[in-house]
Image (tube, rainbow, N blue to C red):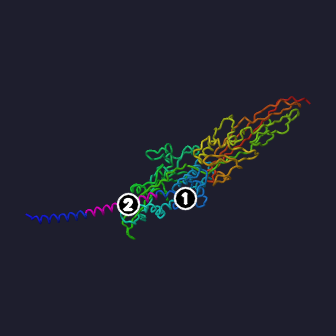
């Protein structure tokens, strides 16, 4: 049996060993917690840097393309605005926030040409030029977003602000460069872009394929997205022989971290899109961070994956364009029993009298009667407005043509410039536009100003910024019609028989109002189309009976 002293010595030895084990375990747990804490700090700093990358790639100058002055690129200057009102020219900077506006405007040119069909005229060259401009800007933006050096600064702006004190007091998370860590991906394929489209505002009778647009794919649907549709992103939109693209951004989303699995599942290559897009614009980015405790020595590394989103939508729109309305010189043809005699012109304002000339002898042999007329013209211009010129303001007309067709053409093109424009807005603009007291062709312009449609005579029209008011549409005559009106113009017949005047008798004047439409794509300095209107009147004198003396 051990002595008390031996037992005491064993207990002391055991206690010493136990204490040593506990110290070792404590140190181990402490080092483990330090290691795990260091990993968490590194990961948190990397996540913070990634989120800043997702935010800054949207519109920072370093990853922004400045329009370079070529005609093809300059065409898109009006869609580079983000906050300024519709109808102004933007700052010429193309970025991830507005690149979809560039592609959408090029797509609108193609749609206008495609809808014109056989009346497209020279529109094919405009489609090609707009496509080339959009592709050039898109390719340049893709190059900037896929160059990792452009993104390093955004990463370190935030990663260095996060604490990594468990590794060292003065340590910071900095960029871990390399193709293995800094990559891009094309996420949310075939989901909504940030271009809102109303299919009912497309050219008359024209429809895009049903799978080109989509409602928001977010679930639940945000309240602001109810009833809205958007062009699909990372989905080939093929029109007029060209494929157009947009980048998907789920409605009202924010830049957010995503998993590596989802990120890599939608990288290109190897996961290509539904059609060739050689230089796609990415919407997701991977980043790498490291903590260096000594020069050249890396103690901790981490990666993060972020998907960007501007949280801003834009309409499918042609912000700066115009429609020209040509009001042809008005004519009045006098006829006697259907045979042309005198002809003259009249102004659309003010109301004026036009004489047929000296009394026409009737019959020619013997001369015992004369007949003439006094026409009261321009009464269709009460009030004297562009709306009166186009629509004549008087309902009776001969059948055989569709009513309101000119207004349908005008409204559709107005909705390309101001998507929420209504027929009542267009009518208001036309009613506020005066005709001029000129005996010649007159030109009027319809265009956006401060977010609404206005119409003005040429003499009062500052061309929309970036547009040329003398530019002509590419298309041929796509549609025309003529309508005959029997009022309100009239003439007074003056008939004299054997020197005795008959009582003045009012007679109707038939006015033929002709309207024709030439479509434009908008690429040629903003011209979206031209409506030509003519007022040609006929006053047919029918003399009364006169018994001539026998010679």
Q: Residues within 10 Å of mark 2 (few under 14, many from 20)?
A: many
Where is the C terminus found, in terms of image quarters? top right
Identify the residue at the far right of this view: 551
Say what secondary structure mark 1 lies in. helix
The label nearer to you, 1 versus 2, is 2
Q: Quadrant of residue 547?
A: top right
In x, y percent, where is residue 296?
A: 39, 70
Horizontal placement of 429 versus 107: left or right?
right
Residue 530 x %, y %: 66, 47
Q: Could you say which quadrant of the image residue 487 lies in?
A: top right
The magenta region covers 25-53
Mark 1 and mark 2: Cα distance apart in space: 39 Å
Residue matched to label 2: 41
Q: State the image coordinates of residue 142 (x, y, percent, origin top left).
A: 50, 60
Q: Position of residue 206 (x, y in %)?
A: 56, 45
Q: How many marks?
A: 2
Residue designated by label 1: 137
Compared to residue 251, the image places residue 67 above or below, namely below
> Is residue 397 among what the camera can see?
no
Main SS type for the magenta part?
Answer: helix
């Amino acid at each position: 049996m051990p002595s008390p002293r031996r037992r005491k010595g064993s207990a002391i030895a055991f206690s010493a060993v136990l204490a040593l084990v506990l110290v070792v375990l404590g140190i181990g747990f402490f080092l483990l917690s330090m290691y795990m804490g260091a990993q968490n700090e590194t990961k948190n700093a990397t996540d913070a840097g990634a989120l800043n990358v997702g935010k800054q790639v949207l519109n920072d100058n370093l990853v922004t393309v400045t329009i370079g002055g070529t005609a093809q690129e300059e065409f898109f200057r009006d869609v580079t605005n983000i906050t300024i009102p519709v109808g102004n020219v933007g700052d010429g900077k193309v970025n991830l926030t507005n690149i979809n506006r560039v592609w959408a405007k090029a797509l609108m040119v193609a749609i206008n040409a495609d809808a014109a069909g056989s009346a497209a005229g020279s529109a094919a060259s405009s489609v090609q030029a707009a496509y080339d401009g959009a592709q050039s800007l898109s390719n340049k933006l893709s190059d900037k977003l896929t160059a990792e050096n452009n993104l390093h600064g955004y990463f370190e702006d935030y990663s260095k602000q996060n604490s990594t004190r468990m590794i060292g007091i003065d340590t910071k998370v900095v960029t871990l460069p390399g193709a293995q860590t800094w990559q891009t991906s094309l996420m949310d394929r075939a989901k909504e872009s940030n271009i809102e489209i109303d299919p009912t505002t497309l050219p008359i009778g024209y429809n895009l394929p049903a799978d080109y647009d989509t409602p928001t794919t977010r679930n639940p649907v945000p309240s602001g997205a109810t009833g809205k549709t958007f062009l699909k992103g990372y989905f080939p939109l093929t029109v007029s022989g060209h494929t157009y693209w947009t980048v998907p951004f789920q409605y009202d989303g924010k830049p957010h971290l995503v998993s590596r699995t989802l990120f890599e599942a939608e990288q290109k290559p190897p996961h290509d899109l539904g059609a060739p897009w050689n230089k796609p614009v990415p919407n997701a980015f991977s980043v790498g961070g490291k903590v260096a405790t000594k020069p050249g020595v890396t103690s901790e590394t981490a990666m993060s994956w972020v998907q960007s989103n501007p949280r801003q939508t834009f309409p499918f729109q042609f912000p700066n364009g115009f429609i020209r309305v040509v009001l042809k010189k008005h004519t009045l043809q006098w006829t006697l029993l259907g045979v042309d005699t005198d002809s003259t012109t009249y102004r659309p304002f003010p109301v004026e009298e036009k004489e047929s000339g000296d009394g026409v002898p009737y019959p020619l042999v013997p001369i015992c009667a004369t007949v003439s007329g006094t026409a009261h013209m321009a009464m269709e211009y009460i009030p004297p407005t562009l709306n009166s010129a186009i629509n004549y303001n008087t309902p009776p007309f001969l059948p055989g043509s569709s009513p309101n067709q000119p207004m349908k053409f005008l409204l559709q093109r107005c909705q390309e410039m101001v998507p929420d424009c209504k027929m009542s807005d267009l009518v208001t603009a036309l009613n506020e536009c005066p005709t001029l007291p000129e005996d010649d062709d007159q030109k009027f312009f319809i265009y956006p100003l401060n977010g609404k449609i206005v119409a003005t005579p040429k003499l009062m029209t500052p061309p929309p910024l970036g547009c040329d008011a003398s530019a002509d549409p590419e298309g041929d005559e796509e549609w025309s019609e003529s309508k005959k009106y029997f009022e309100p113009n009239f003439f007074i017949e003056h008939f004299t028989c054997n020197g005795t005047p008959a009582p003045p008798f009012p007679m109707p004047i038939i006015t033929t109002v002709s309207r024709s439409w030439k479509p434009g794509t908008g690429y040629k300095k903003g011209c979206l189309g031209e409506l030509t209107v003519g007022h040609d009147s006929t006053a047919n004198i029918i003399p009364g009976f006169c018994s001539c003396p026998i010679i």
